[in-house]
Amino acid sequence: MRPTTRIWTPGRILALLAIGIVIAGLARQSLAHPAGWAKVPDGARAGQLSLQRCTYPTEAGKVRADCGTLVVRENRADPKSRLIAVPVTRIRSRSAHPGAPIFRLEGGPGRSNMDFPFASRYIDGHDLVLVGYRGVDGSARLDCPEVTDARRHTADLVSASALRASAAGMRACASRLTADGYDLAGYTLAERVDDLDQARAALGYRKVDLLSESFGTRVALVYAWRHRQSIERSVMIGANPPGHFVWQPEQTAAQLRRYATLCGPDPACRTGSGDLVASMQHTATHFPKRWGPFPIHRGNAELAAFFGLMDASSDAAPISAPMTIEAWRGDASALWFESLASALLFPRAQVWGDSAAMGRIDVATAAAHFGSAQGGVLRDAGSRFLWAGGELANAWPAGPDEQAYARMRGSDVPTLLIGGALDGATPAENATKDLLPHLSHGRQVILDGFGHTTDFWNQQVPAGNHLINTYFDRGTVDASRYVPQKIDFTPSLAQSTLAKDVVGALVGLALFALASLAWMAWRVRARGRLGRVTRVLARSVWAAMIGLGGWFAVTLFVVVVTPSVPVDAVVPLVGGMAVPVALASFFGWRVPTRSAPKAAGLAVALAGALVGGWLGLQCGAQLLALLTTLAGTVAGANLALIACDIAFDVKRRPADAALVVDRATAVSLTV
């Protein structure tokens, strides 16, 4: 007769297969390269471009492209400088005889230049080329976790202590990167545009068109100054002339007055005082400190409001201008949502080393700006945040050529400037006064009712496509297809509604997790086990939902009691998910016939969930990290419980075998 204890039961085999799939997925994610990643090929030389056929995802689906890597020197002034790689993607034109290729230049700074879903709009008659930004894309990134962590571990992002911590993080980051072998003198606008021109030459193009937006228009300007012979035409959307990477409170005030003018006749927007600016100033003067138990951090709300005023349409949700105006009428719930959104979004919004390196080109303007008192309704929140209260100038080393491009120069490149009349990030009047007079072949189009670039890419798209394609094809400016854009001051989703939805979801799922665990405990106590299907759910899908609810409960505590602790830090995230997942898995594991003691099962489930959650956290970033952490806790708890069962079953087998022998002997004696 065989021993009664089976080690490899069908249930365990299936469970291990499922866990293996989860672990394989986490491993793949942890080994995946970030978007825009590239490496220097073995034996490569400076200027070498390697391409292979690929496809590129756009809003119209995948299109034909060539993807590859350009190898450049980190610092062209040093012939012994190391080689770095930047990614290059050429999206092929649909035409057999395309015109000059379009080089796309993203804004930021601190943002990748490799993501452009709107490329399909411009490839009927042109190739479109994306060249990665050194410091953001490719083999050398100026990541600054010191800055990100400093900003994440603060309740108010523009408080004096937060700004000091940000500046200290910048200094520490620059020192670490230098110690790691980075030559920070190679991360300048001049080096970036030389990468672009080196890619142009390597691709075999004589001249290119430039399509830039926001801070990318500064890249386009420097490109025109350094390599005039390489450029056919240039289109700048939301132009940022030299000296304007610092925002002036008086321009923010003018932006509010423009909205007040539009808001006045609109019944949905009219305030009790009849004056939008006065209403917002009243809110600033009597700013609420809490919404119920939830603290509102004024600096965070000001920061969200500043960036919210950049775009006029709901495409910029959840912090568009109409949503911001609604919040700053004094609705505490909406202001809390802005405070929370800032804390979650802005610390990781950019590659901070690149933002510092590029932003320093306006260091003289910043010095003058922060040398005088700044006020306004929003208290200069945008500039204070990005410049660390002005300390960025001293925290990051100066570039060798930053002063060479700090002032406007003349250019004879045919250039079309496109701006929104309600653009709070790059006000159109800056381009009118400080850029257009220096462009001998410059034209400007100002679009009524449009804000910053999010509005341009998403509103009246056919008119925008016609405007840009006509200019690149023939050099003519035709904005005739635009109609005045009406501002919707009643967005379908208000920040006050979002605030209530967020709190409702947090409380609801937290209560669901608590009620689920309480029911499981009662059921196991009353009947000794859960039902067969319920046990499977308790160790899989249900456990994941309970884990998410546990983290929501911890999030509520952190937001109310310890707001300087990030809700996605290791302890609240891993601990908040692991403990309820371990309990749910333990209840699903409990049956009277288990070899392992109950205490051992609970202990290993908790240990497995904690270890699995921590490993899962390392496999993802930002929102994805929530999913990988949750998957890790469920997989870890179940793997630990299966290992515990096997260990105790193996230990029990000799006793089972002896029992079988004793029974066989007894039967033979009886016979």
Image: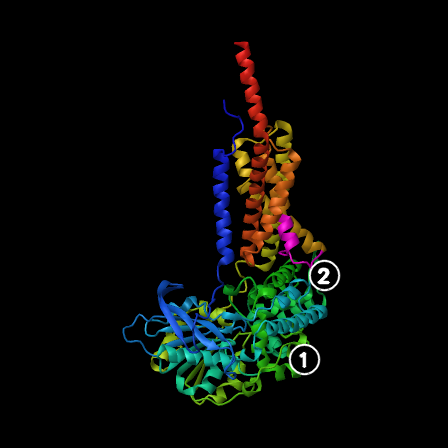
What is the x, y in percent for residue 238?
Answer: 50, 76
Work out whether residue 91 or residue 459 is closer to the camera in this orientation and state it: 91
Q: Which residue is mark 2?
A: 289
Magenta range: 562-577
Picture residue at 65% right of the left edge, 71% below the top: 172
Amino acid type at mark 1: Phe
Amino acid type at mark 2: Lys
Q: Is residue 517 left or right of residue 135?
A: right
Picture residue at 47% right of the left edge, 80% below the top: 193
Q: Residues within 10 Å of mark 1 (few under 14, many from 20)?
A: some
Work out whether residue 590 or residue 516 is closer to the camera in this orientation and state it: 590
Determine if the magenta segment contains residue 200.
Answer: no
Mark toward the start of the polypeptide (1 vs 2):
2
Work out whether residue 331 or residue 251 is closer to the camera in this orientation and state it: 251
Instruction: Give the alpha-carbon distance from disc 1 to disc 2, as whole Å.
Output: 27 Å
Using the rendered view, name the quadrant where residue 637 is placed.
Answer: top right
Picture residue at 68% right of the left edge, 54% below the top: 558
Q: Is residue 245 left or right of residue 120?
A: right
Determine if the magenta segment contains residue 566.
Answer: yes
Picture residue at 48% right of the left edge, 50% below the top: 24
What is the x, y in percent for residue 626?
Answer: 57, 53
Q: Which residue is mark 1?
A: 370
Residue 395 visible to the viewer:
yes
Is residue 501 placed above or below 411 in the rendered structure? above
Mark 1 touching mark 2, by CB under 8 A?
no
Of tags 1 and 2, which is closer to the observer?
1
Work out whether residue 232 or residue 401 is closer to the camera in this orientation and state it: 401
Residue 275 visible to the viewer:
no
Q: Judging from the image, what secondary structure is the residue with disc 1 in?
A: helix
What is the x, y in percent for residue 165?
Answer: 69, 69
Is residue 277 placed above or below 564 in the rendered structure? below
